[in-house]
Amino acid sequence: MTIPFLDLTTVHHELEDELVAVFRTSLQNAAFIGGPMLAEFEEHFGRFCATRHCIGVSSGTDALRFALTAAGVQPGDTVVTVPNTFIATTEAISQAGARPDFVEIDARTYTLDPEKLREYLDTACRRDLASGRLISVRTGSPVTAVVPVHLYGQVADMDAILQVAAAHELLVVEDACQAHGAEYFSAGQQRWQRAGSIGRAAAFSFYPGKNLGACGEAGAITTDDDEVASRCRLLRDHGQSRKYVHEIEGYNGRLDAIQAGILLAKLRYLDSWNEQRRAVASSYDGLLDGLEDVVRPHVPGWSRPVFHLYVVRVHGRDALVRVLAEAGIGTGIHYPLPLHLARPYRPLGFKWGDFPIAEEAAAQVLSLPMFPGLSVESQQQVVEAIARFAAHGNANVLQASL
Ligand SMILES: *Cc1c(COP(=O)(O)O)cnc(C)c1O
């Protein structure tokens, strides 16, 4: 029996009638752009994230670009993020006219390390005497924002990040593209906060494989800030406040009404899907317990993740991927090369060794099959294959490399 990394057909088969009804409604009222389905989805997803505003856009990448610009990032600014993310994070920074720079991650959660952010601001930046602004030594431009990435569905340590950011007057924009419904316990506020409601604004992706996925491209910005929200609404729609009244130059970055309708229909199931993902994760945790060479995901007490991915760490990861593939088990690697070493960022002058924790993680992380409805039997099969590899395969790999 083969086990896919991700099963996108079963859920759409189960929801087919509901989703086809959305399409039929759109054909009947011909409201393909804007309209009631968009407004209703925005209202409900904003409520889901506990934010006052939600602005549907064409992708997670556009959501992040618009959020950065709307929050006040200026062309030429430096925006800090982590090296171990999907390239969309840094693309959005560049598309906002800014320059990406990187800060090391925490070795256990793989999210931005607030202490490393503090260290970066204290030692890799200098204060411009004339303007009083903090200048990145690497980019030569003012550091104005930080983008923590809630990787694999787990929120970064936001209390500490917000504190460091506030001390240096940095904007915080969350990349929540993998974290729909994830929660963070703020010790400062003594309450659980939803991903997307913690920074000045946040970006979500509804790419089909995300915890909430469209049947095509889609994304959204969430924010409590009225001005950021209205700027995002302008940016997504050619800067228009009304038809042909252009306040600024914007983009064509709207969310299709059909996708909004599909997302609205699926949103009703998101809590249940996230619960199923948590159940799959805890079942993996139990099955992998005792396999000493396999490091399981670390969940701090302040985190309630939604397991967009279930990521383990192993030595000999690439050999294990091949063994699992031969056994019919799909896996993923998120991500194989940290962005500071990726071709587009070579001009920034980074080298191997600059972010050792992110680099080591990139060589060892492995995403196991994870989706709502993944059976315990399938999980047992996955873990048995890993255990066989740990017992024999690893030794063979070592021998082969001698
Ligand atoms: C998916 C993703 C994005 C981009 O979303 P798109 O909808 O594909 O543009 C950005 N950041 C992260 C961390 C993602 O996983």
Image (tube, rainbow, N blue to C red):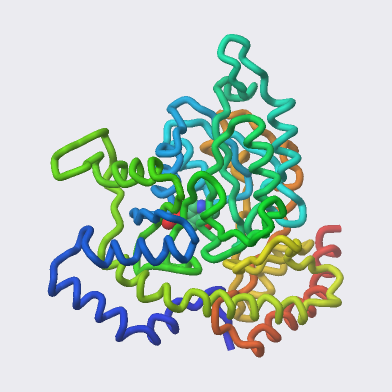
Quick check: can you spot residue 391? Answer: no
Quick check: can you spot residue 398? Answer: yes
Residue at the spot 44% in from the left edge and 45% down from the top edge:
225
The spot of residue 76 in percent (x, y) is 47, 25
The spot of residue 373 in percent (x, y) is 55, 84
Q: Is residue 21 left or right of residue 206?
A: left
Residue at the spot 68% in from the left edge and 48% down from the top edge:
159
Between 376 and 212, which is closer to the camera in this rendering? 212
The spot of residue 197 in percent (x, y) is 53, 54
* Residue 11 picture quarter: bottom left
Tag count in the figure?
A: 0
Residue at the spot 33% in from the left edge and 44% down from the top edge:
230
Between 340 and 212, which is closer to the camera in this rendering? 212
* Residue 142 picture quarter: top right
Q: Is residue 227 left or right of residue 181?
A: left
The spot of residue 95 in percent (x, y) is 41, 37
Relative to 154, residue 92 above or below: above
Quadrant where the image shows the N terminus: bottom right
Quadrant where the image shows the C terminus: bottom right
Relative to 354, residue 325 above or below: below
Between 137 and 360, which is closer to the camera in this rendering? 137
Relative to 246, residue 59 above or below: below
The residue sitting at the top extreme is 130
Relative to 266, residue 168 above or below: above
